[in-house]
């Protein structure tokens, strides 16, 4: 695609940057295709665990032990949910997770934008090498860096605080890479025009580039939210006080303390999943496109 | 308002490409200067250097009384219109116009006043609340112009501002640009590859090729007396016909045409003939036997393509793939003439073309330079 066409696109698309949904011809939506024979069974397989979890969370303890497992509860035990809230500092864990997740998401949006923009547009010595080094860290498994990261975080005196969960995750190589790729697709003339108009580098980033990067930022936010919300290993290593636990960690200890109460565990799981499901429901187009988003250019 | 000086400016890119080679230009205060040339000739680079979007490898650039080599684009007091407009897609037309003023901390009432003024000049009043996506190509072009106007800069830099418009709008905007310049008298540097724009808009035009200036002058002067083969082949549409000629004592031979020739010229020359200087011969006198191949009636005139005996000379300004595909065989050269509609020939006709020695342009084949007569 030529630069002119790209700019045309940018000029044409609305502020979200995505073509509006109306452009999809609705008449194709409900037609049956051969793919459904494949997709429907897969969907069923995907949905069954969720349904099972939901059903179990409403069963009595007796029912959960029944074999073969029942997928239809005979009585709806909503008291399971209130029991969970009374037996564990569930609300506390929920708030902890929310704080950590929100801070990590905001940190990533800010720092990955700054770094991604620098790699996309500012010429500086060693840019290529540093960028490749950052990309290379994507290939290092987390298990390899757990101990050094732990030592650094301990050096900051953050072990067993929420800070331990936030600090190492405020910026991510993935986010830098994704935003850089997106920024590169924005027409450079917009930034040149802004430079002539008198905007500073930061001014260009915050007033021109970021407002046009809604889809990429939303995608990054959604992905980081899910990663952080669902993270288990890192909290397991750095947090040991019950009052500083996140949901995933708390639920695991919950499992230990109430090994037999599968129904309560599932009730807790359902509650912990609600924000993720809501997010997925409302932002799924960003999530799905996020995987391929590195090129708006097409 | 200010004059703009480029003094021995060279731009060499990191990959070693020399985009501009020792360019010196003096643009007077209030002048409308056109940089014209084929793509890749360095005209846009020259403009970007003045804007501060690129830094010269050597030489100095002066705007007003100030050497601006180390001055950021922001502080150069220039405004630029980009080929693809570069309007901020997430802002309304009003916000697009006001952005530069806001960035410079202009007081709000002043912004309001200037935007209203520019919008009145350009007829944007109805469009101020719309975003670029809701504007047509011509309207976007106006907003882009407005964004430059509101700044009240020392100089305007326009980079092929009309090339994305359809033909009709282009003619209209061309006239409008001229009107705006006459009204405001702001120093303007205008880059184009369209020679109609070059001829009609500029006080002076600078013809460029391969990073070098080929000729500077008033449009009519450049048209009437091109200084070298490149300019001869580039300026004029359709371009000047260039044929190989031999000068022997007392005569100039072009193909099967022999003209009495008294001036002293090199033996090998290129002979240039403007299409509009060629007309069917009525009566005796030297003439070229022109075999007609394609006839394009334009209403007010007829463009006729065909061949004549002789050998063509390349000017170096030919655009690849843009030549009229006239089949040429043997010792014949393609030729284009513009006739009066009354003289419209038919394909296959042979027409005798009158050639007036006074209207010929001669160039030294070795150096490519025009020969004074």
Image (tube, coloured by chain):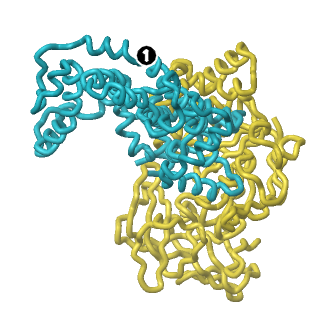
Chain colours: A cyan, B yellow
What residue do we see at 47% from left, 29% from top?
A: A15
Q: Is residue A203 left or right of residue A254?
A: right
Residue A219 in picture, x, y percent from top left:
44, 35
What residue do we see at 67% from left, 20% from top?
A: B117
Q: Depth check: give the residue in front, B123 or A280.
A: A280
Res A27 → quadrant? top left
B323 lies above or below A142: below
* Picture quarter with the N terminus of chain B: top right
Asked if residue B181 shows in the view, the reply is no
Res A284 → quadrant? top left
Q: How many badges with numbers are in the image?
A: 1
Identify the secondary structure beneath mark 1.
helix
| Subunit of label 1 | A
* Picture quarter with the C terminus of chain B: bottom right
Residue B208 in picture, x, y percent from top left:
68, 60
What residue do we see at 64% from left, 61% from top?
A: B41
Residue B169 in picture, x, y percent from top left:
49, 37
Residue B161 in picture, x, y percent from top left:
58, 42
Residue at the far bottom in the pictured view: B249
| Residue pointed to by mark 1 | A91
């Amino acid at each position: 695609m030529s630069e002119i066409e790209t700019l045309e696109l940018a000029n044409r698309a609305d502020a979200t940057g995505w073509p509006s949904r109306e452009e999809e011809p609705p008449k194709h939506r409900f037609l049956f295709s051969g793919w459904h024979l494949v997709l429907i069974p897969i969907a069923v397989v995907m949905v069954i665990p969720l349904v099972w979890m939901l059903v179990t969370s409403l069963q009595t303890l007796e029912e959960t032990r029944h074999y073969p497992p029942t997928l239809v509860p005979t009585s709806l035990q909503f008291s399971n949910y209130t029991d969970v809230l009374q037996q564990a500092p569930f609300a506390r864990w929920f708030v902890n997770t929310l704080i950590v997740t929100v801070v990590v998401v905001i940190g990533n949006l800010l720092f990955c934008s700054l770094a991604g923009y620098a790699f996309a547009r500012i010429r500086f010595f060693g840019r290529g090498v540093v960028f490749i080094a950052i990309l290379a860290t994507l290939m290092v498994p987390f298990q390899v860096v757990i101990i050094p990261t732990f030592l650094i975080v301990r050096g900051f005196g953050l072990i067993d605080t929420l800070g331990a969960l936030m600090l190492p995750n405020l910026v991510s190589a993935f986010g830098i890479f994704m935003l850089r790729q997106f920024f590169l697709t924005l027409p450079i003339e917009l930034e040149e025009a802004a430079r002539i108009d008198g905007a500073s580098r930061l001014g260009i980033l915050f007033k021109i580039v970021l407002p046009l990067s809604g889809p990429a930022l939303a995608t990054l936010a959604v992905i980081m939210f899910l990663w952080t919300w669902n993270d288990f290993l890192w909290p397991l290593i750095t947090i040991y006080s019950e009052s500083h636990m996140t949901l995933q960690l708390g639920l695991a200890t919950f499992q230990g303390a109430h090994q037999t109460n599968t129904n309560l565990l599932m009730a807790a799981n359902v509650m912990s999943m609600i924000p993720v499901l809501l997010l997925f429901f409302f932002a799924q187009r960003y999530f799905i496109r996020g995987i391929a988003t590195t090129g708006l250019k097409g | 308002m200010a004059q703009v000086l480029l003094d021995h400016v060279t731009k060499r890119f990191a990959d070693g490409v020399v985009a501009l080679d020792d360019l010196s230009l003096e643009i007077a205060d209030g002048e409308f200067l056109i940089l014209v040339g084929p793509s890749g000739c360095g005209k846009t680079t020259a403009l970007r250097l003045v804007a501060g979007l690129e830094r010269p490898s050597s030489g100095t650039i002066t705007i007003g009384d100030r050497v601006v080599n180390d001055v950021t684009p922001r502080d150069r007091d220039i405004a630029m219109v980009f080929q693809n407009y570069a309007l901020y897609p997430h802002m309304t037309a009003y916000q697009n116009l006001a952005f530069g003023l806001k960035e410079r901390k202009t007081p709000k009432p002043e912004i309001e006043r200037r935007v209203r003024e520019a919008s009145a000049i350009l007829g944007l009043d109805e469009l101020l609340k719309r975003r670029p996506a809701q504007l047509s190509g011509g309207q976007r072009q106006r907003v882009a112009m407005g964004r430059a106007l509101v700044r009240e800069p020392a100089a305007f830099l326009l980079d092929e501002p009309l090339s994305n418009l359809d033909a009709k709008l282009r003619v209209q905007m061309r006239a409008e640009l001229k009107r705006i310049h006459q009204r405001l008298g702001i120093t303007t540097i205008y880059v184009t590859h369209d020679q109609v724009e070059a001829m009609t808009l500029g006080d002076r035009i600078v013809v460029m090729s391969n990073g070098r200036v080929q000729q500077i002058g008033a449009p009519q002067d450049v048209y009437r007396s091109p200084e070298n083969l490149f300019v001869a082949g580039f300026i004029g549409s359709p371009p000047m016909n260039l044929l190989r000629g031999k000068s022997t004592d007392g005569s100039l031979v072009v193909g099967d045409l022999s003209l009495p020739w008294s001036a002293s010229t090199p033996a090998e020359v290129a002979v240039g003939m403007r299409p509009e200087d060629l007309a069917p011969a009525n009566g005796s006198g030297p003439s070229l036997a022109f075999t007609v191949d394609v006839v394009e009636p334009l209403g007010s005139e007829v463009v006729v393509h065909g061949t004549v005996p002789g050998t063509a000379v390349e000017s170096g300004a030919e655009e690849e793939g843009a030549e009229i595909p006239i089949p040429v065989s043997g010792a014949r050269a393609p030729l284009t003439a513009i006739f009066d509609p009354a003289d419209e020939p038919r394909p296959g006709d042979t027409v005798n073309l009158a050639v007036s020695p006074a209207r010929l342009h001669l160039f030294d084949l070795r150096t490519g330079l025009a020969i004074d007569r």
